[in-house]
Image (cartoon, rainbow, N blue to C red):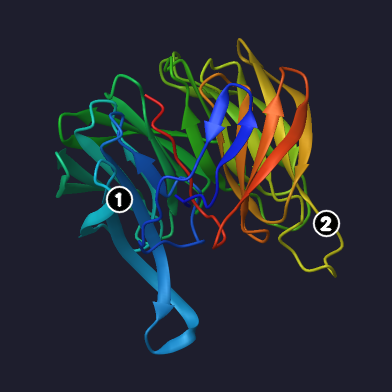
Amino acid sequence: MPERERKQKPAPKERVEETAEVAAPASIIGPPSSAAIAPDESIALVTSATKIDPADAKKSVPDNRVSVIDLKATPPAVVATVESGAGAAGAAINPAGTLALIANRMEGTVSVFSIAGKTLTLVGKVSLGDAKSGPSAVAFAPDGKSALVTRDGDNKVSVLSVDGTKVEPTKRDMTAGIRPYPLDISASGEFAATATAGTGSGDSDTASLIDLKANPPRVVDTVTVGQSPEAVKLSPDGKYVAVTVMNGSNKSKSFPFYNDYGLVVVVAIDGQKLTKVSEGKVGHWCQGVVWSKDGKTLVVQCMIERELQVLGFDGKEVKPVSVIKLKAGPAGIATASR
């Protein structure tokens, strides 16, 4: 959850401004859903999937830390650090603000934490196959009674049941392509979106729509979006999904499918059909993306440029608006969406 350095006004109805900068361990390894904000905006969770190897500064090793940030404090500050599991990556908080799920990418589990005020307590873990299943992103349904988790290690999207603090696999695993990685669920709870990271070999990868009304839930449509999608985010009205696409920009210039820019692709949702509407060029190695509340502004994280790139969307085209410079490369982003 990168912090902003100066005031900007990316669109007439939206204002982006600096509030604070908080020191908390984080990682560029893992999906950009490595931050979560409570619905009442009281706390934020930031995960750290990897850290520098104490024995060799040129290497990294799995990390398991989750920082709890008090957003109501002046200035906001880390008030607790809890341990989740190896490769703590995707984070989600339920709509009631009483439960958190952390996907442990290098352990093959999802940690379950109860939330009381600003206190997180580990109440259990959900095992997903083995350590190589690679649980990456996780999201709660709006009613808080179920959740989805992507598994980029064994190419599955799993449905979890949630009953109080009891979280269990439902044994419903969906297939949405090679290495499903990011994930988001619509505010209505009618559908979810995911995208596949693929093999990083230059082939075009995909984004998929999941029908959550079906019993059991199932993938109903898939579209091609480009090389290595990194994040998906549904618009507040559920009419569009934004996808950040590496587009080869994270590769060396000698890579045969290198491009000197990434993409943000906007796909329209019409019933159970996905249709590409527009795409816009962004920087290099761009990861997370979020929508403004009115659905007219997108904010994209770009690692190499160390900035947030702000784009406008009028329902037809994506156009650049402004940039917000950062002190470090942004790797995870979240909004209090419900």
Picture coordinates of residue 22, whole percent (x, y): 36, 57
Left or right, residue 10 beside residue 33: right
For label 2, count other residues whose C-alpha is less than 10 Å away and answer few (under 14), some (14-19) or many (20+). Answer: some
Q: As shown in the figure, which amino acid type bears the numbered disc 1? A: Pro
Picture coordinates of residue 206, whole percent (x, y): 68, 37
Residue 160 occupies quadrant: top left
Residue 108 occupies quadrant: bottom left
Seen at 50% across and 54% down, the residue is 153
- Quarter of the picture containing the C terminus is top left
* Whether residue 130 can be seen here: no
Q: Nearer the viewer, mark 2 or mark 1?
A: 1
Seen at 29% across and 56% down, the residue is 66
Left or right, residue 260 beside residue 223: right
Of helix, strand and loop, which one carries label 1?
loop
Mark 2, residue position: 260
Picture coordinates of residue 308, whole percent (x, y): 61, 47
Give the label on residue 39, or none.
none
